[in-house]
Image (tube, helix red, strand yellow):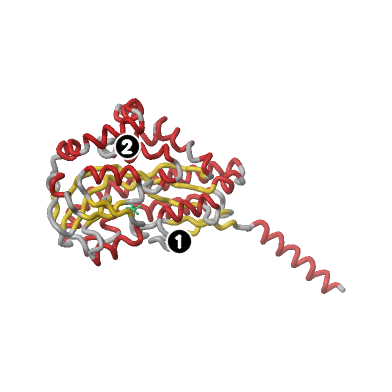
Amino acid sequence: MKLSKLFIGLSLAMGLVAAASAQTTMKISISVAQNSHQGVAIDTFAKEVEKRTSGRYKIQTFYAGALGGERESIEAVQLGTQELAFSSTGPVPNFVPEAKILDIPFLFRDKAHARAVLDGPIGQDLLGKFDSKGFKALAWAENGFRHMTNSKRAVNTPEDLKGLKMRTMENPVHVAAYKGFGIITTPMAFPEVFTALQQGTVDGQENPLSVIMSAKFDQVQKYLSLTGHVYSPCIFLMNKATFEKLSAADKQAFLDAAKEGAKANRARVDTDDATGVADLRSKGMSVVENVDKSKFVAALTAVNADFEKQFGKANIDAIRNVK
Ligand code: EAX
């Protein structure tokens, strides 16, 4: 009798311990490798969430498209089959059309400009547009300025792009713009790109130095041109209902953790941009550093007129005029 009481007491105590340390596990994914600006983003986020919630939330991190490409991961977050995703905004316009404006070529002068826009009222307002689509957008982060690579020839002017078959993101603004350059566009999810380049299904692709390096595209691409034609944001997305179930303090913890992730991510992009050209040259790539950007802008005159109609000149100017 005494013994069974002891057992009941013990198991009650163990139950209490279990309740006190109850942990909710959530998943977050990226489509690129862990050793990257995006890996740093989600690793920092995971660490910060755990720290700020005293371990009540554990974030499981998945890399290199292990849970699918970016569009698939965003879909999964919208459905709630995956709690979180960190993604470039490439496929985002398919879910939140208002984000399209950020994809206009040569919209941002430099990273400081892009960061100021995203962290300022325009960017914060855009984060709010995700709410009605089943997302909580926790924070903007960065993929970087995109540059062209290919296996055929050095690209110095837009004429050199004519007839190149290039993989693009699944993004309508990019596709329209790159057609304006005379590129034969092939939209494709990121996890398929390395093989497509290797097998010659496409001649080239475009991505920030951070992605080119972490994906080892130098192994399958000879030519790199620092065209910087599009600024590519990244974003921390969470399933809206999952976010709403958090306590007020935990909501803040997730938001702050995403901000910390973005900070670490942007710092890594800066490092990659500073070291990327030398690194990729040492791996055998032939790099054109100074392209005449005005020629690339001029090649898009017709496309840009179309973008002005589509997005409103005032909205585009509001972004351009941020100091
Ligand atoms: O998020 O699809 C792309 O080219 C993206 O830039 C890449 O997956 C990094």
* Quarter of the figure with residue 198: bottom left
Vertical position of residue 252 compared to residue 190: above or below: above
Q: Is residue 149 left or right of residue 111?
A: left
**Picture coordinates of residue 127, whole percent (x, y):** 45, 38
Q: Residues within 10 Å of mark 2 (few under 14, many from 20)?
A: many
Which residue is identified by label 2? 114
Q: Residue furthest right?
A: 1
Q: Is mark 2 within 8 Å of ligand 1?
A: no
Badge count:
2
Q: Which mark is residue 118?
A: none
The kind of residue on which mark 2 rests is Ala
- Mark 1 lies on a secondary structure that is loop
Q: Which residue is mark 1?
A: 67
Give the residue at x 27% y 39%.
Answer: 105
Quadrant of image for the N terminus: bottom right
> How far apart, in angstroms, are the residues tagged by discs 2 and 1?
29 Å
Residue at (22%, 53%) from the top-left corner? 276
Q: Is residue 172 left or right of residue 67?
A: left
Residue 310 visible in the snapshot: yes
Q: Quarter of the image containing the C terminus?
A: top left
Toward which corner of the image does residue 190 lie, by quadrant? bottom left
